[in-house]
Image (tube, coloured by chain):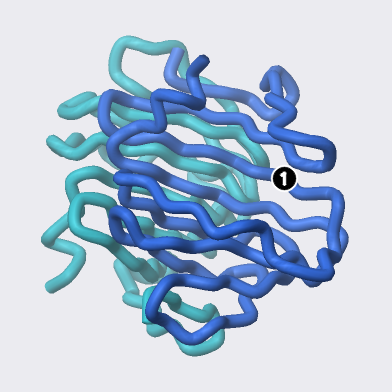
Chain colours: A cyan, B blue
Amino acid sequence: MPVLKVKEAKSTIVKPGVTRRLVHAEKLMLVVIDFDNGPWSEPEPAHFHVHEQTTYVAEGEFIFFCEGEPDQILSAGDMFWVLPNKKHTVQLLSKTVKLIDSFSPIREEFLQ
Amino acid sequence: MPVLKVKEAKSTIVKPGVTRRLVHAEKLMLVVIDFDNGPWSEPEPAHFHVHEQTTYVAEGEFIFFCEGEPDQILSAGDMFWVLPNKKHTVQLLSKTVKLIDSFSPIREEFLQ
């Protein structure tokens, strides 16, 4: 069944205060990330990946950093995208943030 | 700038009561769809596309129909995915529904 109900979903603890749950097709993965450990005094170290990424901000407020771009304060309803190999990161400004990330191709390492 | 702020976003009126706004990379498109014309007495006609799709339910309640699968009532926080060429549709049970859809490849027809 191509459905994951939130009440039945198992979240993976990425690290303390950060959980994710996901579904995926063949080349497309949807990842819901919940942060509960903000605000942060500095951003996470920037990272990059070969996957294209889009993100919808479902809750919270944070600074979005993307290589070659001005920093942006984003909040609920905002959207961004990240091209392959572009360094990016966030710094939480609110206690909680919920991001709806999509990746193509899928993040195989998230399935382990 | 790879950001679309909700306050600056132009929504496309898909039809009365249905709007969308979107961002995309090369092979990945993020589409926020807002329905404001529920509840419906019956589902929309089912449709299909070659694109893979994932969806996060941000608000509302509806029945999700997907070819070959049991119908499911979904609500905020639930997720689903649709494989290429699978017929699918929804029937709104609440007045408003907000879906966070992703597609790969991108829906070129949404750019026109």
Residue B108 or B97: which is nearer the viewer?
B108
Residue B78 in view of the camera: yes
Q: Chain of mark 1?
A: B
Up the image or down, A110 lies above or below B8; here it is below
Please identify the quadrant where the C terminus of chain A is shown: bottom left
Side of A106 relative to A73 (left or right): left
Up the image or down, B87 lies above or below B104; here it is below
Q: Whole-percent x and y of residue B80?
A: 45, 67
Q: Residue at x 69, y 25 (%)?
A: B12
Q: Whole-percent x and y of residue A10?
A: 39, 84
Q: Residue at x 84, y 49 (%)?
A: B36
Residue A93 or B5: which is nearer the viewer?
B5
Image quarter for residue A77? top right
Image quarter for residue B77? bottom right
Please identify the quadrant where the N terminus of chain A is shown: bottom left
Mark 1, secondary structure of its residue: strand
Residue type marked 1:
Asp
Q: Whole-percent x and y of residue A37?
A: 51, 61
Side of A64 relative to B106 (left or right): right
Residue carrying label 1: B34
Side of A92 relative to B18 (left or right): left
Residue A33 or B94: which is nearer the viewer?
B94
Q: Whole-percent x and y of residue A81?
A: 39, 29
- Residue density around tag 1, few if under 14, some if 14–19, many if 20 or more, within 10 Å: many
Residue B4 or B49: which is nearer the viewer?
B49
